[in-house]
Amino acid sequence: MKTEYTREEINQELLVLRNTFEMVRLVDPTRKTVVVFDEEHPEGYSPEKCSCHAVWKNGIDCFFCTSAQAVIKKGTETKIEFKDDTPYIVVSRFICVEGNPLALEQIAPLSKGTMLSAYGINKFVKLITKYNDSIYRDFLTMAYNRRFLMEKLPVLLAQADAGGLPIGLVYYDIDRLKSINDTYGHDVGDKLLSVVTRLVGHCISERRGDFVCRIGGDEFILVINGIDRKYFKPRLEEVAKAVEDHDFCDIICDQQDGRNITISIGGMLSNELPADSNINTYLSKADERLYQAKKSGRNKVIVE
């Protein structure tokens, strides 16, 4: 499939595709803008910098951007999106226009006479949600999993490198979890993991692109999408305090242990490292700071 285009060639391709799809457009997912190559936009970007997510009329960035994935993987990605109550199929294909890596988005409404008449829109949404959860969620805590992290994080880092606020990358774990498992059993430990995940989730905003991942055992990563350094540590201290202040006695029968659950946190900002750093390098640095927090007495937040 053709990926290299001149401006004239891609404009001709767009004309052909618009005979088939309701909407066809070029997107720069790093800048989160729509690209138009014409006489009024010689650089390819409109002065208004039309947000690529504006078409969905929900006022927020797409939580999972298939166009960003297509550009990163240099391939094709597909998803279902909703505009008002209408589901649309979105196909994003990587292309390069005179050296500029972009995504060619092809968007069309799903036929109401086929799938939706059989299942109904509510059941259809539930089926899509269940499918996505099976791929990207941890079944115990319902946090996102490692696969989601490794697909989502490169997009956020690229957007931060393009001029956005840095990404906060955070490791955290529950203090004394092994002791709790040994004393009260792993069922109690599992419940504790789930409740702590929920408490941390209440302190962040998925609408802004923040999320929590469980990457194995008691290892969790919190990603804060775009945060100024002066707010970073205070935000993490709020997370730690939300856990410290919670009464877990409904899970742990011992009053002292039930009121003495804390987490340790190690975090770093993406702009602390060069833009071309490997993702594992970012995560390792946050992990090192978690180790420092544990070593310094637990229930600590270390960000530098």
Image (tube, rainbow, N blue to C red):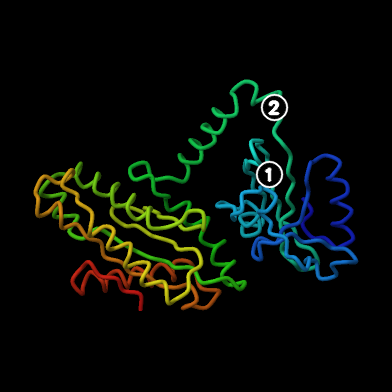
Percent across and percent down for residue 261 are 19, 57
Establish if 259 lies above or below 140. Answer: below
Neighbor class of circle 2 (other Cα within 10 Å; few <14, some 14-19, many 20+) is few
Q: Which residue is mark 2?
A: 112
Residue at point 55%, 75% (across, down): 275
Percent across and percent down for residue 35 are 77, 61
Towards the viewer: 109 or 185: 109
Tell me, yes or no, whether the two marked residues, 2 and 1, touch with CB atoms within 8 Å.
no
* Badge nearest the viewer, 2 or 1: 2
Establish if 135 lies above or below 234. Answer: above
Q: Image quarter for residue 296?
A: bottom left
Towards the viewer: 99 or 173: 173
Q: Secondary structure under badge 2?
A: loop
Neighbor class of circle 1 (other Cα within 10 Å; few <14, some 14-19, many 20+) is many
Percent across and percent down for residue 216 are 33, 53
Q: Is residue 239 left or right of residue 46?
A: left
Q: Is residue 100 left or right of residue 235?
A: right
Give the amino acid at mark 2: Lys
Give the amino acid at mark 1: Val
Q: Image quarter for residue 293?
A: bottom left
Query: Alpha carbon of mark 2 to alpha carbon of mark 1: how far?
Result: 16 Å
Q: Secondary structure under badge 1?
A: strand
Q: Is residue 214 left or right of residue 39?
A: left
In the rendered structure, which disc, 2 or 1, sits on the residue that comes first in sequence? 1
Name the mark on residue 118. none
Residue at point 51%, 41% (across, down): 132
Q: Which residue is mark 1?
A: 90
Percent across and percent down for residue 255 are 9, 50
Q: Furthest-top residue in view? A: 118
